[in-house]
Image (cartoon, grey):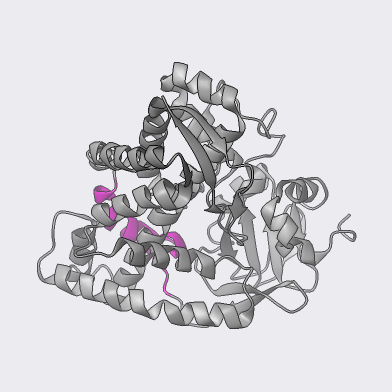
Amino acid sequence: MTEGISGTLLLDPAVIDDPYPFYGRLRAQAPVWEVPGTRVFTVSTYELLAEVVGRVEDFSSNLRCLLYRDGAGLPCTLPFGEAGVNVLATADPPMHALHRKTVFPELVAKRMAQLESDVVDIANGCVSRALEAGTVEFMTEIGNIVPITMISRLIGFHDSDLGQLLSAAFDSTAMLGSTLSYDELMELISRTAEIQTWLTDQLSAAVKQPGDDLLGAVARGVNDGVFGDVEATGMLHTLLSAGGESTTSLLGNAVRILAEHPDLQEHLRRNPGQIPTFAEEALRLEPPFRYHMRSVPTATTLGGVHIPAGATVLLLWAAGNRDPAEFERPDEIDLQRQVPRLHLAFGRGIHHCVGAPLARIEARSVLTVLLERTSNIALEPEHPPKWVNSLMVRRHEQLPVRLISR
């Protein structure tokens, strides 16, 4: 029975900050839920999420609209019409396979592992400065810096302004956050023109002389006719946004969990080999991307619910990651959990995040450095953490912490 579930709950500010009770209600009462008064559906159980990603003909990854919060507090669609660019995460077969094949050799774990020493060096520098200050805003001083630096290096951007790139990455995910008003969303869309121009210039230079990096791989794809300039620029924008956002969110969420559990900190200091498992649990509990969108080209059914053609479907990874039908004690950190990578934080199926290996390397490296060099990590009691106002990303806008040197 779904009559008692108000459509405004999806974007309610209190639910955005703490969505898990609401997600539990959806799993129990409406695993496939049509937001009343809209053509927007959510999917919240692990089983049905796994089913959707396997039905690529019924649930297209092509991005056909953005969502904004209307005056009544409901999600409302802003259709693209034919203007959408479908690359990588928003491409369907067979185009998706061509895009992934073009860039994936530059993203494989072996190449990313070569960057690990760079991650450790950057993390040590950030932590040294933070320890001198004692109390710091973690996101500004560490959590934001490491990922945007590494994704810029991995892509191979030249003369990049890391602050500009970080803002561009956050703007991109904010457009998918679904919590902005129509006017705020249109303003944000207009602001992306600056980074698009910069990316076009980077691509133009690379097309003339492709390098041995991700930018070079994309440029070779243009030279080989795999895709055009518009698709290539969209691909670079997607990689920048995902690479800058996902690990940034993961680092902040993991550090907040550590700060809330001193016993867990001590356990990991004594058992650093379990830091990668902790990172997986942090990903499961607080996935950086709480949902991804699917469009419905023709009418279909899911979980016994009719979904009309043209509907928008939100795959709530964050709800599936806490599904008690799939995970025992789903709201707890369990370092002994079997198959810890079974979570949905990096998506599933053909669109499993190509940058997941880099995110794992960055998380392991930064958390190891932080735990090795501190005796305690604690929240700043007078300045509690603050979440970004987004249905999509689970990132701390502010995370003040106290660090005590070992």
Q: Position of residue 231 (x, y in %)?
A: 33, 72
Return the residue nearer the eye: 239 or 279.
Answer: 279
Quadrant of the image containing the N terminus: bottom right
* Residue in front for this viewpoint, 37 or 370: 370
Residue 102 in the magenta stretch? The answer is yes
Q: 318 or 179: which is nearer to us?
A: 179
Q: Is residue 352 visible?
A: no
Q: Position of residue 232 (x, y in %)?
A: 29, 69
Could you say which quadrant of the image residue 17 lies in? Answer: bottom right
Residue 151 can be seen in this image: yes
Direction from residue 275 to residue 186 in the image, left or right: right
x and y, in percent, of residue 280 in the image: 50, 34
Decide whether residue 180 is among the magenta residues: no
Position above or below: 337 against 77: above
Residue 253 x %, y %:
54, 43
Stretch of the chain drawn in magenta: 85-107
| Left or right, 287 with reference to 234 | right
Numbered label tally: 0
Residue furthest out toward the left: 209
| Farthest residue, direction front | 133
Q: Is residue 355 left or right of residue 287?
A: left
Q: Please, what is the dominant secondary structure of the magenta stretch?
A: helix
Seen at 80% across and 69% down, the residue is 36
Residue 1 vs residue 10, the one in the foreground: 10
